[in-house]
Amino acid sequence: MRRDVRDRLLLPILLPIGILVAMTAVLFGFSRILLAIEGTPATTTALVVAAAIVAVSAIAASRPLIRMSTIASMVGATAGVAMLAGGIALAVVAGGEGEGPGREPGGPPGDGGGPSITVVAENLAFDTGRIEIPADTPVTITMDNRDAGVQHNIAIYADDSLSEVLFQGELHTGPGTIDYAIPPLPPGEYYFQCDVHPNMNGVVVVTGGGGQPGDGEGGDGGDDGGGPSALTIVAQNIAFDTDTIALPADTATTITMDNRDAGVQHNVAIYTDGSLSEELFNGDLFTGPGAIDYQIPALPSGEYYFLCIVHPNMNGTVRVG
C-alpha cells in the first residue's frame, strides 16, 4: 500500500482507536490502584499523576512537530508515573497496616460477646444478601475479603436511604479477614452494604434474642417434662430434616432442636393449623450451631401445624395420639 494512501485512509482510523485502547488500559489499571488505597494516599497519588499528565502534555506541545513516537512517549511516561506513584502508595499503606488486619473501634475479635457470623466478599459480591442476628445482643461479624488489592467493608443503616448509620466498619484491603463488633440492635429489618461497592448489599434481620440449650419455653428440657425426651429435629441448610412430628397424646414432651446452620436463628412453633390463628407453643429463637430443648405441653389427640417462625418454609405436621 502506498504511503500517502495509508496516511490518508488508515491513520485517521487506527490512530484514535490505538490511543483509546491505550488510555483505557492505563485508566483501568490506575483505577484498580486507587480502589486498593484510601484517604490521603489515594488523593496524593491522583494529584501526582495529574501533574505528570500536565507536564508531559506541555513538553509535547512545545515541539514544532508531534510524531507517533512523541505520542507513544507521552502515554508511556504517564503510565509509568501512574504505576510508580500507585506502587509507592500501596507500599506505604501495606506497611502501615502491619501483619494483621485492622480492627473496628468496636473491639478486637470476640469482643462482640455474642454469636460470630462470617460474611465472604469475593468477586465484588457478598456471599449472602441476608444477615440474621439476635436482638439486643452484641455480635461479631467476620468479613473474609478474598478480593486481592480491593477494599470492602460492612456498614449497617436503618434503611437503604442511608440516612441513619447504625454501624460502619473500617475499610479492609483483601485478601484477609477483619472482625466487626456489632453493637446490640433492637428487633427489626435493616440495610447493609459495602460503602466502596454499594451494589454489594442486603438486609440485616434482627429477631428476638436466642436462648441457650435448655432455655426452651416450658422448662430446661430433659426428663423434667414428665414424658418422652428422645425426639430430635435437625435444622440444616434452612430446612428441617422431617416434615412430620409424632407425639403422644396428653403427655408433656421434650423436643430437642439441633440447629446446624451457623449464625442462623431457628425455632419450633406449634399452631392448631396453617392459618397460625391459635398458638399452642412458640419456642425461643436459637442461633446455631448448637442444640436447644423445648418443653412441649400436653396436647390432645389431633393433627397440628409446626414451623420455624423465622423461616416459614420450614414447616410440617404434628400428629398427636
Image: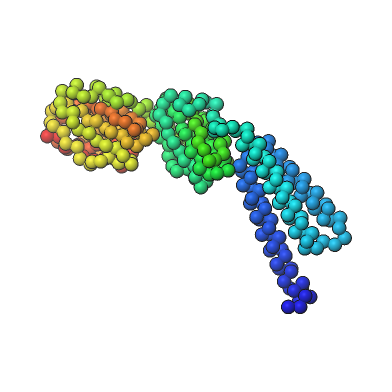
Residue 38 visible in the current orientation: no
Q: In the rendered view, does 239 fall on the left or right side of 85?
A: left
Q: Whole-percent x and y of residue 193? A: 51, 39
Query: In the rendered view, would you say 62 is above or below 38?
Result: below
Q: Write the residue at 64% across / 50% down.
A: 29
Q: Write the residue at 44% across / 36% down.
A: 118
- Quadrant position of residue 129: top left
Q: In the rendered view, does 290 fall on the left or right side of 42?
A: left
Q: Write the residue at 68% across / 36% down.
A: 40
Q: In the rendered view, does 15 fall on the left or right side of 126?
A: right
Q: Whole-percent x and y of residue 195? A: 56, 39
Q: Whole-percent x and y of residue 180? A: 50, 31
Residue 18 visible in the current orientation: yes
Q: In the rendered view, does 124 fall on the left or right side of 261?
A: right
Figure quadrant of the C terminus: top left
Relative depth, front residue between 254 and 271: 254
Query: In the rendered view, would you say 194 is above or below 223?
Result: below
Relative depth, front residue between 265 and 64: 64
Q: Write the residue at 70% across / 43% down.
A: 85
Relative depth, front residue between 282 and 142: 142
Relative depth, front residue between 166 and 89: 89
Figure quadrant of the N terminus: bottom right
Q: Residue furthest front?
A: 99
